[in-house]
Image (tube, rainbow, N blue to C red):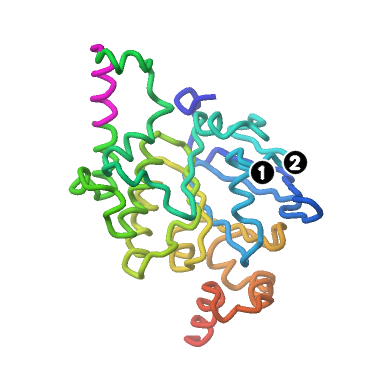
Amino acid sequence: MSASTTSSTAGDILLELDGIGISFGGLRAVDNLSFKIHQGEIVGLIGPNGAGKTTVFNMITGVYKPTDGHIRWHGRDVTGLAPHLLAKAGIRRTFQTIRLFADMTVLENVIAGQHLLMRQAWWQGLLRTPAQRREEHELVERAMAVLEQLDLADVAQEIATSLPYGAQRRVEMARTLVAKPELIILDEPAAGLNEQESAELNTTIRAIRDAGITVILVEHDMSVVMNVTDNIVVINFGKKIAEGKPEDIRSNPLVIEAYLGQDDDEDDPLMNAIHEEQAQS
């Protein structure tokens, strides 16, 4: 199913996880997890370290196949579908660690994100046929439009890995956005960012949503999660323990207990945010 052939109205269920689970050896990494993502939402998936958040992302994107349950995209069961087919259907992701092409410019990196949209055969590129030249022009135009949207147009010809870390994060997002996804999955997009860059990330994520793209993110920076999400799902030991609005999650006793149970809770961002709020009250 291609994103271009699917139509939905605002608020429709875009993605549904229905009782999914997976085990690695004797370890139950995710267990009977269910939640829904509606079109136009920004949803946060949070939990203590080792809760299974990235494993959930890997199942949604086809890297892992759930051993239990179903994943539905626009109501269609896509459980275990190959990653490239899910990407073609409109589900794209970023990763915890930046994966830019080190010897390519910002523009070239973003153009590379459109490879599944290309229609011309390899031999047309060798012969520089009129159709291939037209498509190449379209790819560049589309990439520059996304770079403009993310305030990266001025560095389009710079080597991507020469940019500051925060800008490299935005290049990675641009490479994902240029493929015209319906859903973008952000895996710790604020990792390694300073306070100012995290604040700029909030603006970027809202701009992505304003462009009509649904967002789900795993993030430890609670200044990002609490400020940009419409809904938050909390998991611990692979199970959902809470779901709701940011203001409800912040004060949920099960969530607080899950985070307080960590040995290093004093360094946990959610607990820091809770402690700060309690100190101010």
Disc 1 designates what residue?
Answer: 17
* Residue numbers of the magenta segment: 129-140
Q: Is residue 7 left or right of residue 174?
A: right
**Horizontal and vertical percent position of residue 126:** 29, 16
**Horizontal and vertical percent position of residue 266:** 56, 81
Give the quarter of the image for residue 174: top left
The majority secondary structure of the magenta stretch comes to: helix
Rendered residue at 67%/31% (across/down) = 77
Label 1, label 2: how many angstroms apart (C-alpha)? 8 Å
**Horizontal and vertical percent position of residue 234:** 63, 61
Rendered residue at 25%/47% (across/down) = 159
Is 118 inside the magenta-drawn segment?
A: no
Q: Is residue 65 left or right of residue 204?
A: right
- Mark 1 or mark 2: name the one nearer the start of the chain: 1
Dot 1 alpha-carbon crowd within 10 angstroms: few under 14, some 14 to 19, many 20 or more: many
* Front-lying residue, 152 or 275: 152
Three-letter amino acid code of the residue under disc 1:
Leu
Residue at the extreme left of the image, as rendered:
154
* Front-lying residue, 104 or 62: 104
Whether pointer 1 and pointer 2 mark residues with C-beta atoms closer than 8 Å, the reply is yes
Callout 2: SS: strand
**Horizontal and vertical percent position of residue 273:** 50, 76
Give the quarter of the image for residue 137: top left
Callout 1: SS: strand
Is 139 inside the magenta-drawn segment?
A: yes
Dot 2 alpha-carbon crowd within 10 angstroms: few under 14, some 14 to 19, many 20 or more: some
Three-letter amino acid code of the residue under disc 2:
Gly
Disc 2 designates what residue?
Answer: 69
Rendered residue at 44%/56% (across/down) = 189
